[in-house]
Image: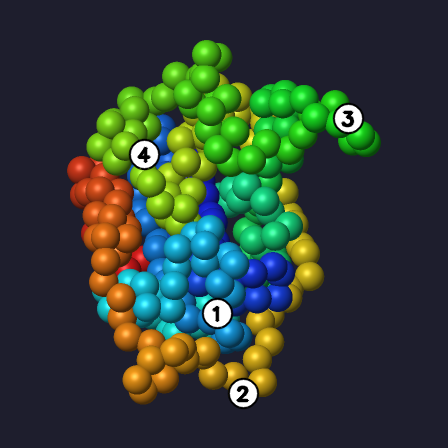
Amino acid sequence: MNIAVFDLETNGLQGSSVLSASSIVFDDEGVVLDVFNRFYLPLEPHNSYVTRIHGLTPGRLLALREHIEAPSHFIEDWPDLLNFWAALDVEGVVVHNLSFDTSFLPEIAQSAFLWWCSMKGLTAYCAIPKRFGGVNGPFKWPKLEEAVDVVCDGPNALAPSKATGEAENQVKNGVLHVSLFDCFGLYRVVSRIAKHRGDLLRFAPFITPFRPPKTRDGQASTRQAGPNGKTAPSRDRFIEDALAYECKLRSLIARSGSPDRVPLSG
């Protein structure tokens, strides 16, 4: 069974633009088959508040986009993501906050695959008590880092498969809060769950209302203060770390002996 994990970084809440989209596809032995990792420009003004969280400034986005060939906006590129999953015979897609991330995909895209929300699906397994109690049971929805701690790193962690253990040794932990790093954390969790607690992986159809980004003129917002009012690519340590992290992940694909394919994930 081939599984995809999927994560986005966005320019705000539902109805904003996607700034990065990442997916790792692996088999039931934890062997990484391919990686999708792309960066996009926002259609609305850049949200400086969320930028403080993920670090994807306008200049960094432009620098990261120099290394890929993809449309400027995710709203134009989601069919390539679906083709990436279809080419790898993905049977189920895992997202940690399913209703949020899938709202950035048109309903026709959502209906093409089966989904599992690891945030809700692992609530009872992680068993993190709610601080103030409340409805819907005694446990809180785990954050991704909490799920990683319980399933992968805590005292009751599940043992990785050989392939997952090798991947963890090769890639190590990243320091960036970008979609590819979160995808690798989710891969660590889901590959263990697939190996030890496959009964929890209940893939099913899921549809949530699509909320496309809105802009007055349909043009990306790339303006900022500067001599010419335009944003220039910003090449710094953040860019170096992001590219190096992706390179480590892609080295797993070559070592896994996966067959050559038309590169959809560049």
Tell me: residue 172, above or below residue 241: above
Percent of width and height locating residue 137? 77, 26
Q: Earlier in the sequence, mark 3 or mark 4?
A: 3
State the SS at label 2.
Answer: loop
Percent of width and height locating residue 185? 41, 36
At label 2, the amino acid type is Asp
Rounded to the nearest angstrom, the CA distance separating label 4 from label 1 is 28 Å
Q: Residue at x 49, y 63 (%)?
A: 48
Q: Is residue 193 visible?
A: yes
Residue where numbered disc 1 is placed: 46
Q: Is residue 182 left or right of residue 111?
A: left
Tell me: residue 176, above or below residue 196: below
Q: Earlier in the sequence, mark 1 or mark 2?
A: 1
Q: Earlier in the sequence, mark 4 or mark 1?
A: 1
Position of the N terminus by quadrant:
top left
Please tell me the numbered disc located at residue 217: 2
Q: Nearer the viewer, mark 4 or mark 1?
A: 1
Residue where numbered disc 3 is placed: 133
Q: Residue at x 61, y 52 (%)?
A: 100
Q: Nearer the viewer, mark 3 or mark 2?
A: 3
Number of marks in picture: 4
State the SS at label 4.
Answer: loop
At label 3, the amino acid type is Gly
Rounded to the nearest angstrom, the CA distance separating label 1 from label 2 is 15 Å
Tell me: residue 13, above or below residue 146: below
State the SS at label 3.
Answer: loop
Nearer the observer, 14 or 53: 53
Rounded to the nearest angstrom, the CA distance separating label 2 from label 4 is 40 Å
Residue where numbered disc 4 is placed: 173
